[in-house]
Amino acid sequence: MDAINNGDDVILEADEWVNKSSGRGSFILKIIDSNQKEKIVIEWPYAYFGMQSYEDVFRRLFPWADIHIDDDFYYDYEVDEYKKSNCPYDNETGEYLYFDHEEFEEWRNELPDIRAYSNSSGEVDHYRLKLTLNRIGEIFLELDNFLETESFYNLNENDIK
């Protein structure tokens, strides 16, 4: 939370084994500072959440955050996906014949807010999500700062008459 409050990006990279009833997944939480230096904060190579949706899992793991796709990271993946599904392809030249950016943006706006950017072999969904502070996170940091910086009187039974 402090990293976000200080202007750094906090990224959650997650893999979900979609065809397993165990809810198996893995998570990496990293901070990317203003110089684009990455630091892994926490790495969970194995996590199991049963049949819960990963969208719910993300929100329960980070109730203090608004969670969004890393839009810049997803963009190229989604252009490729859109072209494969919606644009005519010329096998001779190896190029797509037509790409309408406005239609692509309309298509993209209809995608779920939290979604995988790719899938490996129909088995593993890959996510890269950006966390930002929500109101709970802001209030927590404000309270934490208050408790750390303000001085309090300590009263014990002998002080009370």
Image (cartoon, grey):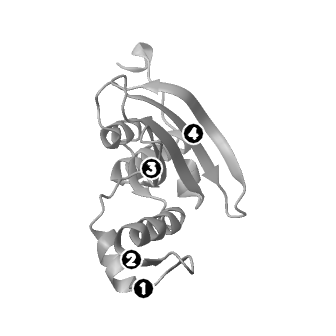
Q: How far, Cα to Cα, is label 2 from label 1?
A: 6 Å
Q: Is residue 148 left or right of residue 17?
A: right
The amino acid sitting under disc 3 is Glu
For residue 87, the mark is: 2
Nearer the camera: disc 1 or disc 3: 1
Label 2 is placed on what type of residue?
Cys
Q: Residue at point 53% right, 45% down?
A: 13
Residue under label 3, please give it: 142
Label 4 vs label 1: CA separation? 38 Å
What amino acid does circle 4 point to? Ile
| C-alpha span from label 2 to label 4 | 35 Å
Q: Which residue is drawn at 42% across and 85% down?
A: 98
Name the kind of residue labelled 1 in the image.
Answer: Tyr
For the residue pair 18 and 25, the one nearer the viewer reads as: 18
Task: Say which quadrant the C terminus sits in.
Answer: top left
Q: Residue 118, relative to residue 49: is it above or below?
A: below
Left/right placement of residue 62 relative to residue 40 reads: left
Question: Is residue 126 depicted above or below 96 in this figure?
Answer: above
The answer to which of 9 and 160 lies nearer the viewer is 9
Q: What is the number of the mark on residue 28?
A: 4
Q: Name the residue under label 1.
A: 98
Mark closer to the chain start, 2 or 1: 2
- Where residue 110 sits in the image (x, y, percent)? 26, 67
User: Upstream in the sequence, badge 2 or badge 4?
Assistant: 4
Of the two numbered discs 3 and 2 on the same chain, state the one appearing first in sequence.
Answer: 2
Q: Which of marks 1 and 3 is nearer the N terminus?
A: 1
Mark 3 vs mark 2: give the one in front: 2
Q: Are marks 4 and 1 in contact (CB under 8 Å)?
A: no
The CA span between labels 4 and 3 is 27 Å
Whole-angstrom CA distance, mark 3 to mark 2, is 50 Å
Crowding near the residue tagged with mark 2, few <14, some 14–19, many ≥20 C-alpha atoms within 10 Å: some
Q: Disc 4 or disc 3, which is closer to the eye?
A: 4
